[in-house]
Amino acid sequence: MCIRDSHNTLHYLCRIFETLAKMGLGTKQSYFVLDKLTDMYFESFSEEDLARIAFTYAQTNRENKFMGRLQGHFIKNSKSFKLESVAKIAWSFLVFEEKSLEFWSTIKKICEPIEEMTRISRKSRALFYQVLTEFKDGYIQAIQFNVEPQTEEALKAAYLQNLQIAQVQGEYLSLIHISEPTRQAEISYAVFCLKKKT
């Protein structure tokens, strides 16, 4: 497998896989391709794309070797990850029921003070709120996040808003068609068609 202009290509492939997972359209074949890409090009992915891949796997709760590799990489290079990516990674490992004290201690170290998490995107705040909720309920007794009430409320508000938006989108829009790519070339496109439900 040869990928030209690898960083840009890998970035767009990550976005495609993430979108397919969100829409429930991933296939066995598409995840086979993702498995191969992550195995062959792990070191070439940006921190943002590594977070996207983790998020993609977590949305389908699909067994893979990538998460184990990511955990070691994340602990070693945690300072280079932005909070947006950290929120995705934390949520993804929560889905896979990761219990490593070293991993969660690293997450805690990056995210405190938690007030910093209120400055990231709504979707990322919503993900991190779910992580906080699990730890508040005793996910790992040895680790507790220190959160001020107003900060927790701000994160909760993002979570509830995210739920509301997802519900509206699911209620009023449905996927009716995905075209085949126009051609096998460097520049190609496919069309996603959404229809308003009646």
Image (cartoon, helix red, strand yellow):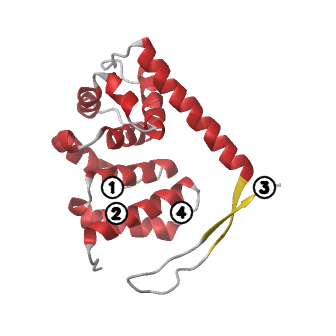
Residue at x 51% of width, y 66% of height: 28
Labels 2 and 1: the sequence-earlier one: 2
Inspect the image, locate mark 2, and give the three-letter code of the amino acid beneath it: His
Above or below, 188 relative to 134: below
Q: Quadrant of the C terminus?
A: bottom right
Q: Which residue is mark 1?
A: 49
Residue at x 57% of width, y 79% of height: 180
Let me know if residue 137 appears in the view. Answer: no
Describe residue 53's horizontal placement relative to residue 104 as left or right. right
Inspect the image, locate mark 4, and give the three-letter code of the amino acid beneath it: Gly
Describe residue 39's horizontal placement relative to residue 127 as left or right. left
Secondary structure type for disc 3: loop
Q: Nearer the viewer, residue 55 or 63?
A: 55
Residue at x 33% of width, y 44% of height: 85
Inspect the image, locate mark 3, and give the three-letter code of the amino acid beneath it: Lys
Q: Nearer the viewer, residue 53 or 118?
A: 118
